[in-house]
Amino acid sequence: MDLSRRDALKAMVAAGGAAVATATTPSKATAATARPDAVGMLYDSTRCIGCKACMVACNKANKLTPDTALSGGLWQMPLDLNGQTKNIIKLYEDPKDGERAFIKRQCMHCLDPACTSGCLLGALKKGEFGVVSYNADLCIGCRYCEMACPFNIPKFEWSSTAPKIVKCEFCKERLAEGKPPACTEVCPTGAVIFGKYTGLLAEAHARIDQYPERYIPKVYGESEVGGTQVLYLAHTAFAKLGLPAYGSDPVPTGVREVFQEIYQGIVPPVALYALLAAVLMRSRRQITGEASPTEPPASDAQEREAP
Amino acid sequence: MTTETRPQPVGGAIFTRPVLALLAVSAVAGALIVWRFAVGLGQTTALNDGYPWGLWIAFDVVTGSALACGGYALALLVYIMNRGQYHPLVRPALVTSAFGYSIAGLSVMIDVGRPWLAYQLPFFWHWNLRSVLLEVALCIMTYTFVLWIELAPAFLERAQTSSIAWIRRLGEMWLPVLRKSLVWVVAFGLLLPTMHQSGLGTLLLLSGPRLHPLWNTIMLPLLFLTSCIAMGFGVVVLESALSSRLLGRAAEIDMLAGLGSVIRPVIHLYLVIRFVDLIVRQQIAQLFAFDGYSILSLIEIGLFFGALALLREERQRRDLGTLFRASMLLLLAGAMYRFDVFLVAFQPGPNWSYFPNVNEILITTGLVTGEIAGYIVLIKLFPILAGQPRVAAPRAARIAAAQPQTVPAH
């Protein structure tokens, strides 16, 4: 056995140290690309009148009981997305100049989602049409998706004893029937429209070009966290509307660098295991208990440290 | 042969008043756990959609498993760094590790919403190989088994001296088998914590966009790994100091002083990574901004420095009280670092807040008291602690005590 403890230590340091190496090299995040069949949603805040018809339609299509707790059971009144609400219209009002804008929030259907990267058994998966969908049969309710999502989208049924994750799944059943998502179907002003992802992106830019005074010259979701299939246009700063200024690196980039690349093909862990076992062979008399009568006389006894 | 005495049961009454008191707290926790499953997490915890992970994850799992790294740290020292003189500390460390990890696993099952589906975790055809959490979950599950197997010789040795024939046969049959294969198990015992303790840090990389810049770094895995090794040594020192004080045993001061000097380079490494990272990411000014986050970081880093200062001189390292204080500071530092990353640095937005409620705190407390009670019972019944008379005795007496002893009455 030619392996020394020094080698084993080196390997252990290397396992962690690979993280140092990757961290010191510039980020080689590859921009996420949309699937050819990717669909999308374009929400134009300047066209939204805040009627919330989309919220009602969403609850109906997804068979969600409206959250009426705050209104004493009278009408739907969620404070945010929650276990009963996959889609919400919020009003932003500037406390100083009174500037107002509506904003629609639901799952962004990221091109390279954090939630699906973290999900243990793939209960959340990016599939047909690029939709991030949920399969409760594979969900153990760990809520890592909630920890991971940069947009705070997945919600949990906290009051249930068999809780599920609740989030917009782009009305996947309707999509399968060739129908658009319920919210886009009922919108009276066309503030939220459905279509092919690439087409919507072009449409968004065309609107900015056509009415430059009406929009901030930016399509939110085009580059944020690698791109999202839900796109936003607005007159009000996106950050004020609750859409943070994120860079173009997909959220799972760091995990890819220090986790997936190190563990790739499970070769490094297996190699490290073999190395450890080889080194441990020298200490085996100690591991097994020195006075063991069953222990065969070890040939490497002289290698053991003097007491 | 060294003069090292073989481990032997401490003996004495099992259900002493302190043990019963500890178990009473666990019973309360047990009732609350039943309630949690009866009505769901929303009513029984302060967890919410902004802070979906709270005390149970930050303490029981993330901090608890780091506090249970004594077995890992000592195995590194004894078997890889070849410091055989620390071998007598391995078994007691394995007990705290085995309990710590079992409790981490149990907490996860209380925390997740749909634990009955966790049986699917070993089904590799469902595995999402990009998931750090899957790696952590599988490693922790496996490592918990590994720890109990590493500890099994203690149970089997005890079985050999049993007065019941079939238990004796069990010990005689399995001990040689186990001893032959233990090397392979111990190798797992070194690999798995390296993977999942760093993995616990990697977990929060996915929350990166919402993590405060003081803690949001690609170095999280290395910082978690180095600090868990330091904490592992810290726990061994603390536990050894406590059990010698509480059980009236002579302190293993040579070994503890030695560990005191082993801890120092590990803390140094952690601090170097921490500071170099802050400098490279140009966040070092944030550290001295003296807002809430900067103050928390400074306290956390200060605790590490405090432990270092207490362990600086050999004279200090040979003093049981100083060792105790130093290891307390170190464990506090590591725990605080983990709380800061999981609960403070993580910022879901201004509308969300979290502070653990009474149920969460009581359940966590009950799990910890159960662990302590379990530790006490195990060292009394099984050969865990290095054999030693109750008071420091001349070497001759100690060697005599090492001879095959009669089973303590209980």
Image (tube, coloured by chain):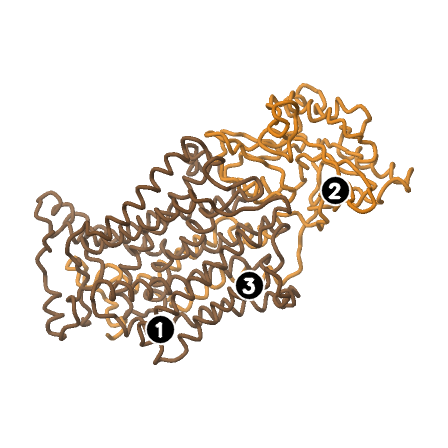
Chain colours: A orange, B brown
User: Is residue B125 visible to the viewer in this orientation of the structure?
Assistant: no
**Please, is residue B135 above or below residue B331 in the view?**
above
Quarter placement of the N terminus of chain B: bottom left
> Marks 3 and 2: CB-CB under 8 Å?
no
Q: Which mark is residue B322?
A: 1
Q: Which mark is residue B144?
A: none
Q: Which secondary structure, mark 3?
A: helix
Q: Which residue is mark 3?
A: B297
Q: Amino acid at mark 2?
A: Leu
Q: Is residue A119 left or right of residue B34?
A: right
Frontmost residue, B8 versus B408? B408
Q: Amino acid at mark 3?
A: Ser
Question: In the image, what residue occupies the spot 51% across and 61% down?
Answer: B223
Q: Which residue is mark 2?
A: A241
Instruction: Indicate the position of residue A141 as horizontal and vertical percent values.
Output: 49, 36
Which residue reaches farthest front?
A: A72
Question: How far is disc 3 from disc 2 in space, using C-alphas?
Answer: 31 Å
